[in-house]
Amino acid sequence: MKRISTHISLLVVLFVFLAACGDKETKQEEAKIVKAEPKPKPMRVYTADGVSVNAYDFSGFEYFLKQKNDTTYVVNFWATWCVPCVEELPHFEKLNEKYKEDKVKVILVSLDMYKMVESKLLPFIKEKQLKSEVIYLRDPDQNVWLPKVDSTWSGAIPATVIYNKEQRKFYEQSFTYEELEKEVSNFK
Amino acid sequence: MKTMKILGALAIVAFMSAFTIADSIPTGYKIGDVATDFNLKNVNGKNVSLKNIKNAKGYIVVFTCNHCPYAVAYEDRIIALDKKYSKKGYPVVAINPNNPAKQPADSFEKMQERAREKKFSFPYLLDEGQKIFPQYGATKTPHVYVLEKTAKGNVVRYIGAIDDNYEDAAAAKTRYVENAVDALLSGKEVSVKETKAIGCSIKA
């Protein structure tokens, strides 16, 4: 009888010990999330007429594809010269505006050529009064970074990644507003 | 008898779904596939087929167009590829895959203008009806397919970008197409067979 109770108490001790360990691990996990990487420093900041855009190479930009919080991110790859991209921008703007209280954030990633940033991109942002965050991604070695965005991406734009901490989906296509809203609604 | 009917129905369903699945698989060539020839209208008004190009050991097929800044950024490099390799048996054949009704800057007349301005030394063809580019699986401009002429047909040896720097030809570290053609000319295997790059999506 005594031996059994010893066994039981040993088991209890073991259990408490394991539970404590588990708890510790969870706390460490939480700490990791809280201590998320700081926002990377841009390679360069382009500014004109009260409009400014941060430029990143892919290693800096990757931060914006890896957020783990309760926001759903809609990351759209576009360029001022890309007609179908420009046509669908208002849908992304509308989405960003409509759901800003609902933890949806649109990031517009411009792939304009560097010679066009000051002559085309900044005036475009001002003229269209873009409210979503615009980032300029300048990394000419596309064969290295394109597959890191998505292995199926052929490189055609427009292209969009929608993700949150649980799910992620890649779209090499144009969106109507309805299609975009429907896709984002699947992320909640 | 009833079982037979059910089995029959199942067979039909299976048969039909097999087709649906086949339909949804993205088409396009993989490395080692035999690429189709074509007969498309060149900017000089005459039709061009790969089989009619004399002394070719293969072809550098480039899906490109007028309007796309990436295609424009690569224009001089496409001209240089033809200068360097057509005499070695690998001429450039450029194809505009865009539907001019959707992209007026890529109309046949505008193609003729551009070819004249830039003195294209290679055929610049219009994919009328947009029938050829989907068979190749091109999704954007520029999009290159290096084909080797063999007894079994024109075999796809390389798919992708021209080099690894769209902004600046001089800064490019790896010239993928040149490396591929050089390898083929010396009877070696192409080392980098597929690459990816940003381009303008094709408007069919």
Image (spheres, coloured by chain):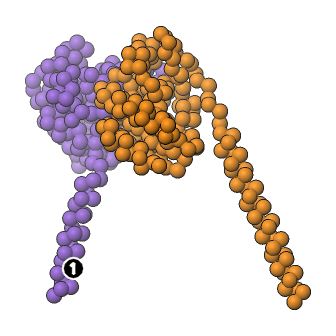
| Above or below, comparing residue A54 to residue A29 in the picture | above
Residue B141 position in % (x across, y down): 30, 30
In the shown orientation, is residue B137 left or right of residue A132?
Answer: left
User: Quadrant location of residue B48?
Assistant: top left
Front one among A125 and B22: A125
In the picture, the quarter occupied by the C terminus of chain B is top left
Quadrant placement of the N terminus of chain B: bottom left
**Which chain does tag 1 point to?**
B
Q: Is residue B96 visible?
A: yes
Q: Residue furthest right?
A: A2
Q: Residue at x 72, y 52 (%)?
A: A27
Residue at x 19%, y 23% (from the top left corner): B104
Identify the chain drawn in orange.
A
At label 1, the amino acid type is Leu
Q: Colour of chain B?
A: purple
* Callout 1: SS: helix
Side (left or right) of B56 relative to B39: right
Q: Can residue B71 be seen in this snapshot?
A: no
Q: Residue A79 vs residue A33: left or right?
A: left
Residue bearing the label numbered 1: B7
Residue drawn at (54%, 35%), measured in percent from left and top?
Answer: A64
Residue B7 location (% of width, % of height): 21, 79
Position of A142 compared to A181: left or right? Answer: right
Position of residue B155 measured from the top left corner of the image (x, y, whole percent): 28, 44
> Tag 1: Cα neighbours inside 10 Å, few (<14), some, or many (≥20)?
few
Q: Name the residue rendered at 24%, 33% in the picture.
A: B203
